[in-house]
């Protein structure tokens, strides 16, 4: 399994490439910006992009969907509750003083309990609202589970809830009732910053005490 996470764009969103070493098929999680960088990483690993999945539709997580789809004709999936944010990319761009990216095509709406798969890789879907109404966490099962939590759970922090559709009670409920059910050694790849583990956050995250 190829797993490569790297920051992209003004707000340094963590984009992750998941690739199967046998089939060479790949999933990209949160292509927020710098499509040329993402495409170069895919080409370095000789991977064919087959799926794009989005943890939530803030501009820094979706800005490169259009260009990746132009290159690879790839399907993209979000939770439907975040569609309104995607439709307001121009407003989001004005918040941070940047240009409005071209809007990619959403091919599928996914929800709690669904899965997104390519040949050799399957991600489980957990609906974890609070940062946005449609925030999702993706689960890569294995001997050590990996969670792609977007802006729901960070190292010793949680996502903002003061933006459109945010809810502090909801994000705490999502984390406590859904994410904290995983084993302590579960790896958490957050939407920004350093990776962490469920056990570390259970013991040290001040928002969860």
Image (cartoon, grey):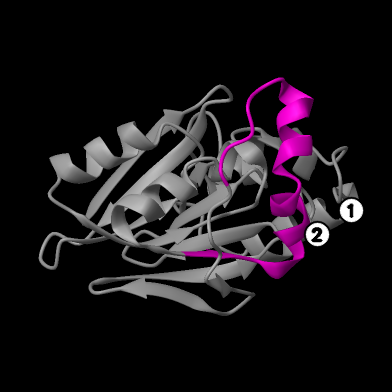
Residue carrying label 1: 169
Magenta region: 76-102
Spot occupied by residue 202 in the image (x, y as percentages of width and height): 64, 46
Residue drawn 57% across the image and 42% down it: 61
Q: Which mark is residue 57?
A: none
Q: Are marks 1 and 2 in contact (CB under 8 Å)?
A: yes
Tell me which corner region of the image, top left, top right, bottom left or bottom right, holds residue 205.
top right
Query: Viewer-proximal residue, 120 or 97?
Result: 97
Spot occupied by residue 121 in the image (x, y as percentages of width and height): 30, 69
- Rendered view: 116 above or below 159: below
Residue drawn 67% across the image and 47% down it: 152
Residue 205: say if magenta.
no
* Any part of residue 159 in sight: no
Which element type, helix, strand or loop, lies under badge 1? helix
Residue carrying label 2: 173
For the C terminus, which image quadrant?
Answer: top right
Tell me which corner region of the image, top left, top right, bottom left or bottom right, holds residue 90.
top right
Q: How many numbered discs, if any? A: 2
Q: In the picture provided, is 12 more to the left or to the right than 57? A: left
Residue drawn 73% across the image and 53% down it: 87
Spot occupied by residue 13 in the image (x, y as percentages of width and height): 53, 33
What crowding class fits label 1: few (fewer than 14 Cα within 10 Å), some (14-19), or many (20 or more)? few
Report the Cα–Cα distance between label 1 and label 2: 6 Å
């Amino acid at each position: 399994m190829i797993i490569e996470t790297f920051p992209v764009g003004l707000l340094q969103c963590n984009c992750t490439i998941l690739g199967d070493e046998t089939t060479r098929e790949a999933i990209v999680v949160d292509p927020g910006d710098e499509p040329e960088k993402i495409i170069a990483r895919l080409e370095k690993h000789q991977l064919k992009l087959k799926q794009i999945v989005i943890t939530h539709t803030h501009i820094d997580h979706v800005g490169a969907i259009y260009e990746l789809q132009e290159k690879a004709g790839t399907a993209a999936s979000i939770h439907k509750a975040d569609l309104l944010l995607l439709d307001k990319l121009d407003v989001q761009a004005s918040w941070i003083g940047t240009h409005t990216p071209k809007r990619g095509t959403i091919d599928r709406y996914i929800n709690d309990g669904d899965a997104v798969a390519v040949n050799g890789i399957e991600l489980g879907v957990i609906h974890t609202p609070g940062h946005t109404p449609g925030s999702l966490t993706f689960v890569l099962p294995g001997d050590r589970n990996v969670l792609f939590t977007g802006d729901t759970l960070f190292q010793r922090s949680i996502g903002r809830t003061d933006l459109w559709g945010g809810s502090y009670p909801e994000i705490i409920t999502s984390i406590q009732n859904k994410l904290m059910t995983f084993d302590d050694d579960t790896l958490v790849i957050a939407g920004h910053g350093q990776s962490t583990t469920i056990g570390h956050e259970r013991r040290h995250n001040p928002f969860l005490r």
